[in-house]
Amino acid sequence: MAPAQKSRRVLAAMSGGVDSSVAALLLQRAGHEVIGVFMRNGVAGKAAQEKSCCSASDARDAAVTAERLGIPFYAVDYAEEFAALMDHFAAEYRRGRTPNPCVSCNQQLKFGRLFALADDVGAELVATGHYARAVDGELRTARDAAKDQTYYLFGVDRAALQRTSFPLGDLTKAEVRAIAADAGLVTAHKPESMEICFVTSGDYRDVVRARGGGGRAGRFVDAAGHELGCHDGIDGFTIGQRRGLPALGRPHYVVAIDAATGDVVLAPRDGLDRTVATVAGVHWLVDEPAPGSELAVHAKVRARHAAAAATVTTDGRGNALVRFAAPVTAITPGQAAVFYAGDRVLGGGWIEA
């Protein structure tokens, strides 16, 4: 992280993991006055305590780290807000979509709420342990491409980037762990979790079925509508899925889900390829293109997807048509499509079809 020009009061989100711990440490070393905050999600039980991010054990690790750094530390209850995210998560699966709650959490909670907290404690900046960079008010990808998390951050308010610090943006994961170990932080060797924090059982369907019931039962069908078998709920499937399907002689994949009829459409591998996606709720981190104009971008349709060359055409009402230069596999309604130009994040939205 570049040396700070002046000491500032910074509110650092501390999740109890190594990344946010090192972010707070680096800010302190740069001469800033750091205040740590932990966001409780209200998910209880033994399984929740073993989950990374927002669990009781994570709260303890965050508090221990703050104590070692000698910084003020607060735990704030956001159980009600997390419950709303969980309700939306369940509702999306019942609609035949595959939600991405981490994007919504960053937009509505981690950044949606942190700036209000920062104002309450008189902090100029908000910092997190995300692998990303904020440069002159623009969101940029992290130096460690394997850890880059900008896909999850496209929904952050553009103005908020002026008050955002990502201390890990120029570091690799190995460097972050080495810094934590050298500093004797309790989180230095803590395992990383890639799971959704509120899916404590390991099966997201438990969340869906506990919050309004599972999706509609129905048929497996081929592209022509011929029945291939039956299933007990569309919430058990996502575009591109291969496991849990009828044995059909050669591999088949889920290529479409009809929430109204309960039909799950199956096809061989090439049936997943698409060259066009419609996107809604587009949020721009740069000046919005003129309606009808084509913007050349590289677009990611899921977090682990390599960004693919595409053009984006907006309608001026928050919708966009994305045309890919080559077929892209498993474009999934409910996931985000995020637009890049080099290392700059231009914006993104939610895939509709």
Image: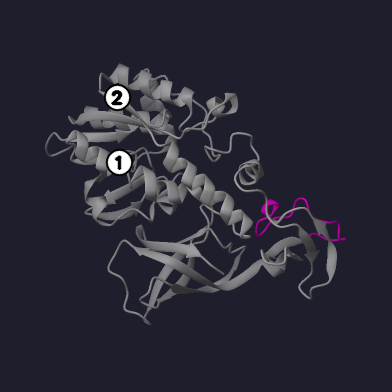
Give left or right: position of 68 versus 300: left
State the residue at coordinates (64%, 69%).
273
Residue 153 point in image, percent of width and height: 39, 51
Confirm whether the magenta stretch covers residue 327: no
Q: Which amino acid type is marked by label 2? A: Phe
Q: Nearer the viewer, residue 254 or 122?
A: 122
Which region of the structure is painted magenta? 235-251
As drawn, the label of residue 236 is: none
State the residue at coordinates (32%, 43%).
113
Residue occupied by mark 2: 73
State the residue at coordinates (25%, 23%).
72
Could you tell me if residue 38 is visible in this image? yes
Residue occupied by mark 1: 114
Q: Which amino acid type is marked by label 1? A: Leu
Instruction: Provide the secondary structure element on which disc 2 rests.
Output: strand
Where does the C terminus fall, quadrant-wise?
bottom right
Labels 2 and 1 touching (C-beta < 8 A): no
Residue 29 location, quadrant? top left
Looking at the image, which residue sits at the far front?
A: 212
Residue 319 point in image, percent of width and height: 43, 72
Q: Earlier in the sequence, mark 2 or mark 1?
A: 2
Q: Is residue 139 above or below residue 22?
A: below
Residue 61 location, quadrant? top left
Which SS does the magenta portion mostly show? Answer: loop
